[in-house]
Amino acid sequence: MLNLNSLNYNTSEDIYWTDGSYMEVPESIATKVSYDQSGNHSAIRINSEWYQSKWGPSALVKHHPNDVHPSYQPLKTKKYYIKKPLIVGVDLLYGTETYTFYRTPANYTFEISPNLTLVSSGNNTIKVTPTLYGSTYINIWYNNFLIAQKLLSVGPPIISGITYDGYALNAQIYGSSTSVIKTEWTIDNGIYSSAGTWIYPPVNTGTHTISVRAYNNLGWGSPFTTDFTFPGSSMYSINLNARNPENCLPPAALLI
């Protein structure tokens, strides 16, 4: 048993386990270990036999899993962690897209759902293209344990909401909005088209029924409909005496 009675071991390790940087896993795949329910000591797991610890300014110590400071005897529950891997890429697919894996352990494997086709892979990146509409996923596995998953949607754009900045209405697109080619807006009984995700509305006060749908290379998405209440006063500025037309912002109806 190590003679650790005089070592400075009071540290707070909880911040590492609770800020999203790490995820709890089985001991067999862990790289970090948290001792004590208060989380005030951690160790590096080298393998099933050896851990490595450092108490305050003392030396780095290689020790067996249960060979720790007397204050941990009898040993309380240990928790095991690895750095939480990330899968970075768009949430809405309509063509070939690239996904990058970060903070992955060595010898990990990845899995894609049946409605995706793998185009290429290498250097912690993959390129995939969709084959069928619907929900899909990308998984990262390590020693038969799922350590990361990204849920995706394949198909036309999905609109999750509408915002208004005082000048224009903007359709909030689920995932990436770069795939949107155009949108179609229905405001009360009028239908308006836009080459992007936003439009200057013909009204800017009161409550109106607004519906919008978006189009990409896979077709039109389902419309999003809501009763939208505009601010009580208009934010448009009109200067009838402006000598330069570019200094005059016309009423919203003229910008449709």
Image: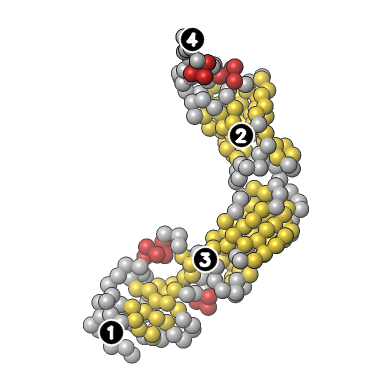
Amino acid type assigned to the residue bearing label 4 in the image: Leu
Residue that label 3 marks: 103
Q: Residue at x 60, y 53 (%)?
A: 89
Out of 111 and 104, give the one closest to the viewer. Answer: 104
Q: Is residue 150 above or below residue 6?
A: above
Q: Say whether disc 1 or disc 2 marks the residue closer to the N-terminus.
A: 1
Most extreme residue toward the bottom, as rendered? 1
Q: How far is mark 3 from mark 1, CA to CA? A: 33 Å
The answer to whether any part of residue 97 appears in the image is yes
The answer to whether any part of residue 71 appears in the image is no
The label shown at residue 4 is 1
Q: Is residue 191 above or below residue 61?
A: above
Residue that label 2 marks: 197
Q: How far is mark 1 from mark 2, CA to CA? A: 64 Å
The label shown at residue 248 is none
Q: Secondary structure at mark 4?
A: loop
Of the 4 image quadrants, the one containing the C terminus is top right
Q: Is residue 165 above or below residue 138?
A: above
Q: Position of residue 54 (x, y in %)?
A: 33, 78
Of the 4 image quadrants, the one containing the N terminus is bottom left
Residue that label 4 marks: 240
Q: Position of residue 123 (x, y in %)?
A: 61, 66
Q: Secondary structure at mark 1?
A: loop
Q: How far is mark 4 from mark 2, CA to CA? A: 30 Å
10 Å crowding of disc 1: few (<14), some (14-19), many (20+): some
Amino acid type assigned to the residue bearing label 3 in the image: Arg
Q: Say whether disc 3 or disc 1 marks the residue closer to the N-terminus.
A: 1
